[in-house]
Amino acid sequence: MNKMTVRDIEVAGKRVLVRVDFNVPVDVKTGAITDDSRIRASLPTIKYLLERKASVILMSHFGRPKGKVVDDMRLAPVAKRLSQILERPVKTTDECIGPEVEKSAKALKPGDVLLLENLRFHAEEEAGDADFAKALASLGDIYVNDAFGTSHRAHASISGIAKYLPAVAGFLLEKEINTLGGLIEKPAHPFTSLFGGAKVSDKVAILKNIMPRVNCLLIGGGMAATFLKAQSREVGTSLVENESIETAAGLLKEAEKSGVRLLLPVDAVVADELNGESKSAVVAIDAIPRTKKIADIGPKTVEIFSRELKRSKTVFWNGPMGVHEIPQFAGGTQALAKLIAGLNATTVMGGGSTAEVIDALGLADKVTFVSTGGGASLEFLGGDELPGVAALRDKK
Ligand code: 3PG
Ligand code: MG
C-alpha cells in the first residue's frame, strides 16, 4: 500500500481520531452482539496508539438509522464489549459532534479511549457534508482510517474528514489492502476463486477483474441459476436475474477465450420453497423440476469443486453455495468451508456472509485471512479505488 500509516506519524500526546467499522452483527431479538470480529480487528491500531501515549477517539456507524436517533442503534453495547476486550475503561458520549463532545475530547489524557455516538444519527455523515466533517475533525489532531469495511463509502468520517487533518491508515486497513491487493497483483498459481450468494449483478465487476488472474472460477449459490439460464438450461422456479443473463453469457464466453475453467454446479439440492419445512431432493442439473427451486449445490458438485480447490495455491471465496441459514440447505457451503480451512494454500475469505459462515464454524483461524469488508472487499477486488483509501496521505 502506498499510503502513510500510523507508523509514519508522531502520535505521542496527540488526540487521534480513529474511524473504525464497529457495525457488528447483533441478535435481532436481544440486541446482543453475535460476532465481535470487527471490534477485535481494530485492536492492533488502538493498542499501538495507547502504548505510544496518544488519546484515542473512536468513531463508527452502527446499522442504518438514516439520519435519526434510533435508540436500538446506540453504540453503548459496543463500547462495553470493547472495554472488556481492551481491559480498560471506554468513555462514551451521546452525540458525535457539539460542545459536550468537544469538552469530553479536550478532557482526554494520554491512554484514554472515547467512543463517539453513532455517526449516522446525522444525515450529514452519509451525505459527506463538509461542515460535519470539519466538526468531527476539530475533535482531534490526527485522523486514522481503520474502517476498511466502510471505505467504499464517500462519507464525512471516511473521506471528507481527511481534508482537515493529517490522514493515515490503521493496521487493519493496511492489512486488508495488502492481502486483497496481493490476490490481484501476485497470486500463487493455481488460483481458484469460488463465488456464491444471490446476485450476479453484485459480482460483475469482481468477476471481470479477477478473470485474467485466476485459473479456475467456481460458481454456486443463487447466482448460479442466472449462469445456468445463460446456457439455456431449465432452472425451475429459482430466482433468475433476467437483466444479468447476457452478462453471465459474456463471462462464460470470456472464460472460454482466456482459458479459465469456469465451473457451474452439475447437481443441486432442490425444494418447493426455501424454508426449513420444505421437502428437498438432490437432482442432476439438467433434471431440475419446473416447480422447484435450487437451494444448495449437490454432492457431485461439492466433489468437483473440492478437487479444484485441493490443487490450488491461492483461493478466494465470496458468497455461500446455498441458503446456508437453513440447515438442510447448508451442506454445500459447510463442506467447502471445511475443505478450504484445511488447505495448505493462501486462503482469503470475502467479508459479509462468507465471514459469518467461517466464524460460525469456528474456522476463522484456520484460513489465511477473513476480510472485515463485505461491499468494500467486492469493490476493491472489482478494481475500484476506495474513497477512504484515496483520501489518505501518500507515502513519501
Ligand atoms: C457493512 O457492514 O457493510 C459496512 O459496515 C458498511 O455499512 P453499510 O453497507 O450500511 O454502508
Ligand atoms: Mg454493506
Image (cartoon, rainbow, N blue to C red):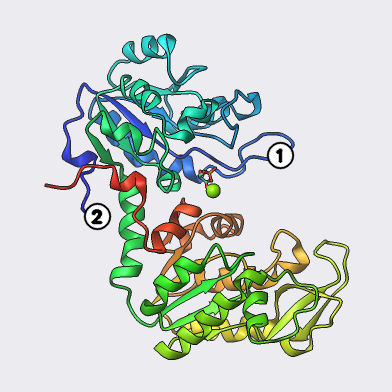
Q: Are dots 1 and 2 in contact, CB under 8 Å? A: no
Q: Does the residue labelled 1 lie within 8 Å of ligand 1?
A: no
Q: Is residue 383 above or below residue 66?
A: below
How far apart marks 1 and 2 lie (CA) works out to: 37 Å
Residue 21 horizontal/vertical position (percent): 46, 40
Residue 321 in sight here: no
Q: Residues within 10 Å of mark 1 (few under 14, many from 20)?
A: few
Residue at figure coordinates x 21%, y 42% from the top left: 393
Q: Which amino acid does label 2 sit on?
A: Met
Residue 390 in sight here: yes
Q: Which amino acid does label 1 sit on?
A: Val
On residue 189, the disc is: none
Element at badge 2?
loop
User: Where the N terminus falls, by quadrant?
Assistant: bottom left
The answer to whether residue 4 is left or right of residue 41 is left
Nearer-N-terminus badge (1/2)? 2
The answer to whether residue 324 is left or right of residue 49 is right
Residue at label 2?
Answer: 1
Residue 176 horizontal/vertical position (percent): 36, 54
Residue at label 1?
Answer: 28
Element at badge 1?
loop
In this view, the residue in front, 260 or 124, is 124
Q: Is mark 2 within 8 Å of ligand 1?
A: no
Q: How crowded is mark 2: few (under 14 residues within 10 Å), some or many (20 or more)?
A: some
Residue at figure coordinates x 37%, y 63% from the top left: 383
Q: Residue furthest left?
A: 396
Residue at figure coordinates x 55%, y 62% from the top left: 202
Residue 287 horizontal/vertical position (percent): 79, 88
User: Which quadrant would residue 90 be assigned to in this image?
Assistant: top left
Frontmost of labels 1 and 2 is 2
Q: How many marks?
A: 2
